[in-house]
Amino acid sequence: MRIIPKLPVILAVLIFACTEKKPVEQEEVFVPIPPIVQEEISVSSQNCNPDSLSCTYVHIEFPEFTDSTKLALNGLIEQKIKAIVTGYFREDTIPGTLEHIAQEFIYDYEAFMVDFPTYEFGWYITANTDILSESPEFISMRIYSETFTGGAHPNSNTSYFVFDAKTNRELSIADIISDTTNFKHVVEKEFRKEKGLAKDQSLADAGFWLDDGNFQMPKNIGLTEDSVIVHFNPYEIAPYSTGTTTLKINRKELGGILNLGSANQ
């Protein structure tokens, strides 16, 4: 005998079938590529801890542009870092890429330790590149690096660069400042103020290495939103013990001699 279900049961089945949800197709989420990504090269001898005094390591950080109009800057940044951190190498033995430089540095240390197994200190190279300011006209960067391969102290260096944002060309002081003679006077005034020197006090007698006692045009210039930065590294104008000198000159003090129009806004 065939059993026929009661009507309420049939209706319940039909209602359940009609109300059952269909799987919802997931929409693709577009994740934009950031215009700048931070790259890192980190290598150590035998995977040692860089915080240890006996560890030899290389740690390099730098920005990489993904915007197609800025790709040329990536090569320039790498060139700048290589020029700074390869002082350890002989010119005819400088490796080709930053990765090769890092690995070669580790190899050299390990070969050194074979000959001098009782040596207790590690070597290191560090380099960090920061973007100080970016505008439609220019991009200003700073590279700080330290290298230690033995000796009384590490060698440190801070370099500033300004690039044309449209052409990716590195800008010289003359590109940034229209009147370099006037600029030199402004920098010297700020320098004397920073060092507590009188207007007519001899710079040479105060312990600074300057041609004929005259103030010299700085090599390192950077830009921020409100300042022009002038930097002197150790050994550049004074002994290592004097340290570095960094001057921040307000753009308003430079009047109309600052060439970059947007920098004056």
Image (spheres, rainbow, N blue to C red):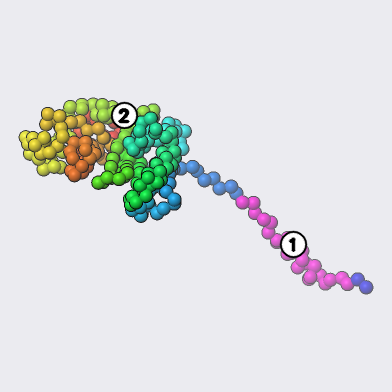
Residue assigned mark 1: 17
Kind of residue at disc 1: Ala
Does any portion of residue 18 appear in the rendered image?
Answer: yes
Quadrant of residue 139 within the rendered picture: top left
Furthest residue to the front? 115
Question: Is residue 6 shown in magenta?
Answer: yes
- In this view, the residue in front, 73 or 201, is 201
Quadrant of residue 191 within the rendered picture: top left
Look at the picture and state if 7 lies above or below 143. below
From the top left corner, tell me how far across and down residue 169 is, in percent: 36, 28
Q: Residues within 10 Å of mark 1 (few under 14, many from 20)?
A: few
User: Residue placed at 30% from the left, 45% from the top?
Assistant: 150
- In this view, the residue in front, 89 or 25, is 89
Q: Residues within 10 Å of mark 2 (few under 14, many from 20)?
A: some
In the picture, which quadrant includes the N terminus? Answer: bottom right
Residue assigned mark 2: 171
Question: Is residue 220 shown in magenta?
Answer: no
